[in-house]
Image (cartoon, rainbow, N blue to C red):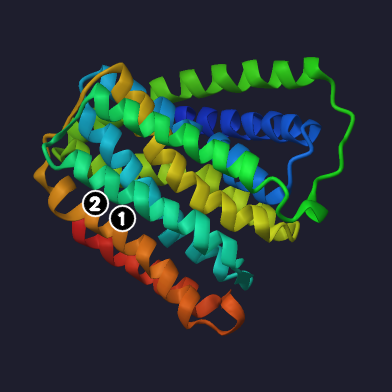
Amino acid sequence: MTTQLFLLILGLSLLIAGSNYLLKSAVDLSIKLNLSKVVIGLTVVSFATSAPELLISISSALKGSSDIAISNVLGSNIANLGLVLGTALCFTSIKIPKSNIKYDWTFMMFVSILFYFFLKDFVINRIEGLILFLTLIIFLFFIVKIRKDEHMDDVVENEKVSNFKILLLLILSSLLLYFGSELFVKSSIYFANYFGVSERVIGLTLVAIGTSLPELVTTLVAIYKSELDISIGNIIGSNIFNILAVIGITSLITDLNILSESILSFDIYVMIFFSFILLIFYLSSKNRFLNIYHGLVYILLFITYYLYIV
């Protein structure tokens, strides 16, 4: 058991390191393309911080543990709002631009409901995976092409970073993410069997929180650097990427068969509920600022949910 615990921590450490290097190389690349902070947060940063979820879901599905793959996404999306945003709001107030709700939140709710309907027959097949992946392409096109001129005064200054360094970081991050995901998934399955709990619970707790750490660190760093456009964009964008990219790509590789009925009867509703709360907070807040009180509500709901499933 001690060895498996060590491998679990090692795998998680590799995932965080890989995500960090991927984030750095992706941001460097986006800077060369003169993208605004809003676009970077919604696309580049979101994809980089969702990379652990993608690798773990693929690895889990190929090992026949589809419940971990599905619950990983559900748990991560819940943790992104309840834990990551909730924690962030305890440190600072965040103003949510109208465009984040009008476009990004609306799209997040759309893909969440689409995800729900695909789950209703307890399997996400390759056709549904293809639909999710194509929806991701539409989302990226919308963000980059239609919203590229939004907040162009916030375009990040172009630093001289060589293409070789960007390529090297991409290769290094990919290797770290691959080996990290393999170690983390194998150890997670071991602990599920050891403690006699379902893969759903492991996916919603251990795996989900572990893979949400990059989002948490990235958001806190963005707040420290006063890059709040990146922080809120990263959280919403990551939830979108988790469904469209992680589930979409994983189900293109292999069908995802759901064993736990609680995923469809409870967890998916909690994920949608946490997303809907963001709109309630936005509409009820003065000047569209979310503060520590909103953060505490999110954290309390998150803790309550975890106490219930455990």
Q: In this rendering, would 140 be left or right of 131?
A: right
Which residue is identified by label 2?
Answer: 268
Q: Please, is residue 254 above or below residue 84 in the view?
A: above
Which residue is identified by label 1?
Answer: 271
Q: In this rendering, would 112 be left or right of 123?
A: right
Q: Please, is residue 267 above or below residue 137 in the view?
A: below
Q: Which residue reaches farthest right?
A: 160
Q: In this rendering, would 92 be left or right of 56?
A: right
Frontmost residue, 9 versus 101: 101
Q: Whole-percent x and y of residue 28?
A: 76, 32
At 54% across and 76% down in the image, what residue appears? 292
Q: Can residue 94 be seen at all in this image of the molecule?
A: yes
Quadrant position of residue 249: top left
Frontmost residue, 147 versus 13: 147
Figure quadrant of the N terminus = top left
Q: Please, is residue 122 above or below residue 177 in the view?
A: below
Q: Amino acid at mark 2?
A: Ile
Q: Whole-percent x and y of residue 25?
A: 70, 28
Q: Amino acid at mark 1?
A: Met
Frontmost residue, 246 versus 155: 155
Q: In this rendering, would 209 be left or right of 253?
A: right
Quadrant position of residue 27: top right
Q: Which residue reaches farthest bottom?
A: 286
> Could you tell me how far apart the alpha carbons at marks 2 and 1 are, in whole angstroms?
5 Å
Q: Whole-percent x and y of residue 310?
A: 21, 54
At 62% across and 45% down in the image, what residue appears? 146
Circle 2 Cα neighbour tier, 10 Å, few/some/many (<14 / 14–19 / ≥20): many
Number of the label disc, if any, that sits on residue 136: none
At 74% across and 22% down in the image, what residue appears? 166
Q: Whole-percent x and y of residue 32?
A: 80, 31
Q: Are marks 2 and 1 in contact (CB under 8 Å)?
A: yes
